[in-house]
Amino acid sequence: MNRTQMLTQGAVLLAVYTVLLLVVLNIPFLGFILTFFLPLPFLIFTYRFGGAASFLMFGVGCVLTVLVGTPLALIVPITFGLTGMMMGYALQKKWPRMQLLLSTTVIFLIAVVIQYATSIVFFEINIVEEMFTTVEDSMGQVSSILSATSPENAEAFEEQIAGTIDLFQQLIPTLLIISSFVMVLILQAINVPLARRMQVDAPRWSGFHDLSLPRSIIWYYLIILVLQFVVTDPSGVLYPIVLNGLFLMQLLMFFQGLTFLHFYGKTKKWSKTILVLLTVAVFLIPLGFFVLMLLGIIDIGFDLRSRIQKKT
């Protein structure tokens, strides 16, 4: 009976996935919106029948993708199918929200790297390289105009742009990680509530204010800070690794500080309007990033939340 249910529900969910895929591939604007719902069939199936059975559905989904689309469309089930499977598995095992987010981010990031590698190996298209080439060409045109109107500032402008582009090129790994995490956060916010309506026992997580990174991450941050003073040669192999590690840790500390701000506001019963205004102000004020980063470090290092909770 269980096998019959698995086959029946798998066929229904694959039909839903196929319809979503057809819309995504053929109707641009609506397809973009429905892209965020693609993990749902895989999430539900994995939650109900486990990880082993979900790979069978994934394989059939890949075949259907080729039949209704092209081999290039295989990146859709690789990206969103595997992401949905990871979410379903995490929900089935009742993992905490942060563990779900981090594990799913790893899967999504792997899928993005596969896309990038495929475009280079099979199509000889380096998307990142072409993007930076386009930026350099645009800045070159701006520099030419500046040279004609203000020659004394043109050289400084070119050096500044070259340094900025070089920095972003070195930070590509971190930018991919952050963008993957944000995408997974959006996918989780959309698909988990929908799955809950379809008899998936997904926990009703508390708000943003209760999100907190593991306390052990402070040690990784300290290690990166020490390595920053040891690895100083920009041409060295370890330099981009340390640079990316430092940037990533700073972003994580900022994230921790932002969640602490919301936690403190919730504890003091601030209105949502005040919290929204403070959050916006943080991104507009130049020192806002560093203040919240410091707050995040203090929160993790000294467990500020527990201290505040004891006083209330």
Image (cartoon, rainbow, N blue to C red):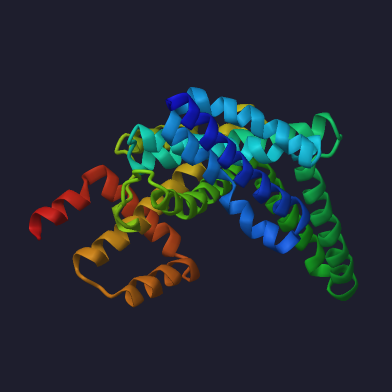
Q: Residue at x 34, y 33 (%)?
A: 219
Residue at position x 52%, y 46% from top?
A: 40
Residue 232 percent coordinates (x, y): 57, 34
Quadrant of the image occupied by residue 155: bottom right
Looking at the image, residue 83 sits to the left or right of residue 77; the answer is left
Task: Estimate the x, y position of residue 70 in percent, counting from the top left.
Answer: 81, 39
Quadrant occupied by the C terminus: bottom left
Give the side of residue 34 with respect to residue 165, left or right: left
Q: Position of residue 65 (x, y in %)?
A: 72, 38
Q: Is residue 234 above or below residue 261?
A: above
User: In this orientation, which residue lies closer to the viewer: 9 or 228?
Assistant: 9
Front residue of 201 and 75: 201
**Could one spot residue 242 in this view of the protein?**
no
| Picture residue at 58% right of the left edge, 30% below the top | 57
Say which quarter of the image contains residue 108.
top right
Looking at the image, residue 286 sits to the left or right of residue 271; the answer is right
275 sits left or right of 264 in the view: right
Which residue corresponds to the image point at 16% horizontal and 49% vertical from the top-left? 306
